[in-house]
C-alpha cells in the first residue's frame, strides 16, 4: 500500500495540511526514550541531591513546556490546544526511562508533541547531570502509541 506525503503538494513544495474540514475527536499519543548514565550519576538523581537541584521535577516541567511549543519547533505542525501532558520516569539498572503522554480533543494528532516532550525531558536530565557524567547516552526515542483520528489506534510492536 503506497501512501503519499501529506506535507508535499503536487509540485513537490512543502505545505501545511489543511485540517479545517476535519472533525474534532479525542486523540492521545505516547512516546518514550531513555538516558543511560553511570551508576553514581543515577544514584544521585534517584536520591534527589544533584548539584543543580531536582532533576526529574525540572525535566517533567521542561517536557510539558516543550509539548506546548511543538508548533514553534516543527515547521508543519499545527498550533494545538493540548488538554494534558504527563511525563513519567522509571529507573532502570543504568538508565532513566521517560514516557510522555499528550492528549487533546482536536482535528489533528499529538504524536510530535509527545515525541518532543520525551526528547526535551531527556535533554533536561542530561543538562542537569552533565557535571556528574558527560558520557550519558540519550536514545530509543520513539512513538509508542497513538489513538484517535482517521487512522484509529496504533501501537508499536513489542510494547505492552
Image (cartoon, rainbow, N blue to C red):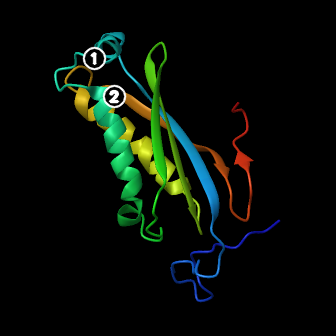
Say whether residue 142 is visible. Answer: no
**Circles 2, 1 touching at the beta carbon (< 8 Å):** yes
Q: Is residue 15 above or below residue 122?
A: below
What percent of the width, then of the height, locates residue 30? 57, 44
Q: Is residue 31 left or right of residue 122?
A: right
> At numbered mark 1, what does the secondary structure look like: helix, strand or loop?
loop
**Residue 137 point in image, percent of width and height:** 39, 30
Of residue 122 and residue 27, the one placed in the foreground of this image is: 27
Q: Residue furthest bottom?
A: 11
Residue at label 2?
A: 56
x and y percent of residue 7 in the render?
Answer: 57, 75
In the figure, 96 relative to 14: above or below? above
The disc label shown at residue 48, or none: 1
State the quadrant of the N terminus.
Answer: bottom right
Q: Is residue 88 left or right of residue 123?
A: right
Instruction: Report x, y in % for residue 90.
Output: 48, 23
Amino acid at each position: 500500500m503506497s501512501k503519499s506525503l501529506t506535507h508535499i503538494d503536487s509540485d513537490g513544495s512543502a505545505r501545511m495540511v489543511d485540517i479545517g474540514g476535519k472533525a474534532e475527536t479525542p486523540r492521545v499519543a505516547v512516546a518514550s526514550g531513555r538516558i543511560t548514565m553511570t551508576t553514581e550519576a543515577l544514584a544521585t538523581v534517584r536520591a534527589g541531591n544533584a548539584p543543580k537541584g531536582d532533576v526529574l521535577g525540572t525535566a517533567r516541567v521542561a517536557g510539558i513546556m516543550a509539548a506546548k511549543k511543538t508548533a514553534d519547533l516543527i515547521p508543519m505542525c499545527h498550533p494545538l490546544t493540548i488538554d494534558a501532558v504527563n511525563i513519567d520516569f522509571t529507573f532502570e539498572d543504568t538508565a532513566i526511562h521517560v514516557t510522555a503522554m499528550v492528549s487533546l480533543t482536536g482535528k489533528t494528532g499529538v504524536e510530535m508533541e509527545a515525541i518532543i516532550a520525551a526528547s526535551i525531558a531527556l535533554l533536561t536530565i542530561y543538562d542537569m547531570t552533565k557535571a556528574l557524567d558527560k558520557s550519558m547516552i540519550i536514545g530509543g526515542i520513539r512513538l509508542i502509541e497513538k489513538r484517535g483520528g482517521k487512522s484509529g489506534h496504533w501501537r508499536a510492536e513489542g510494547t505492552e
